[in-house]
Amino acid sequence: MENDLSNYRKSYDKGELLLKDAPENPMELFQKWFYEVDKYFPEDENNAMTIATIGMDGYPKNRVVLLKKFTFEGFIFYTNYNSEKGRAITENPNVCLSFFWHGAERQIIIKGEAEKIAPNMSDGYFESRPKGSQLGALASNQSEIIPNRTFLENKLKALEIEYERKAVERPEHWGGYMVKPVEIEFWQGRPNRLHDRIRYQLQSDYNWLIHRLSP
């Protein structure tokens, strides 16, 4: 390699996160950070998040999905329930989400349990998608081996003809999950690698225990 990665350096100096400014509920801070990043760094896909699952082979696996809604109860994304991630969640619903907003020098790590949302909620979101995306959900047996790209494109073309004059119904194997958090950690980059880390942990009485962590 031509570049020596050990020499890569960056100074973090765009913000601070002090314990005195941390609200009692971490979802308030998530909402504040999300909308700040969305306002000041609109060029980024700020709802892109990494989800880590434990696969049936025992290995963790990360991939990027899109956050489509968040409430005080949790974080919602959509996928194929028969996909590798869907099967992993069925076996072990404990997952980890992470957001990294490099423009704001912020990271959020969320541990939680994923569960399927109500079918009518998945119906509503599926109906809001462009028809091409709806047909894509039908065409792709996500995570399954296929012979080539032409195979996939031919399936889509056949579906476009089939559904040219009719609505596309949500397939039962496609829908949403809500990740209900049990721990959320907020990271704000600071100079000299003395980053701010605030961790929230859900207690049995549904209050949140808050600690500052050493970077």
Image (cartoon, helix red, strand yellow):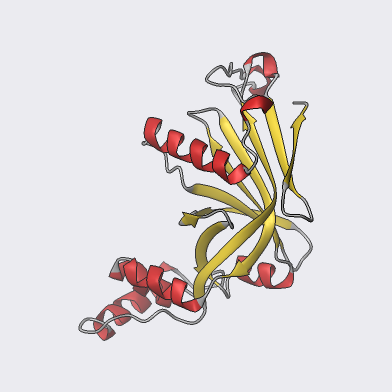
Left or right: 210, with 121 as reference point? right
Which residue is painted at 52% across and 79% down in the image? 173
Viewer-proximal residue among 177 and 204: 204
Seen from the viewer's position, the closer of residues 31 and 52 is 31
Up-down relation of residue 22 to residue 62 (above or below): above
Q: How many marks?
A: 0
Q: Is residue 190 above or below residue 42?
A: above
List x then y, in percent, for residue 215: 74, 26
Q: Left or right of 154: which side holds 10?
A: right
Q: Residue furthest top?
A: 192
Q: Residue at x 69, y 56 (%)?
A: 112
Q: Height in image: 3 above or below 81?
A: above
Name the residue rendered at 63%, 19% in the picture: 190
Asked whether 24 or 6 is in front, the reply is: 24
Residue 199, position as x, y percentages in the image: 72, 38
Percent of width and height locating residue 111: 70, 51
Name the quarter where the N terminus is drawn: top right
Q: Residue at x 50, y 65 (%)?
A: 78
Work out whether 103 lies above or below 160.
Answer: above
In the displayed structure, does residue 37 sit left or right of residue 27?
left
Between 159 and 114, the residue placed more toward the observer is 114
Q: Quadrant of residue 20?
A: top right
Image coordinates of residue 53 in percent, x first then y, are 68, 59
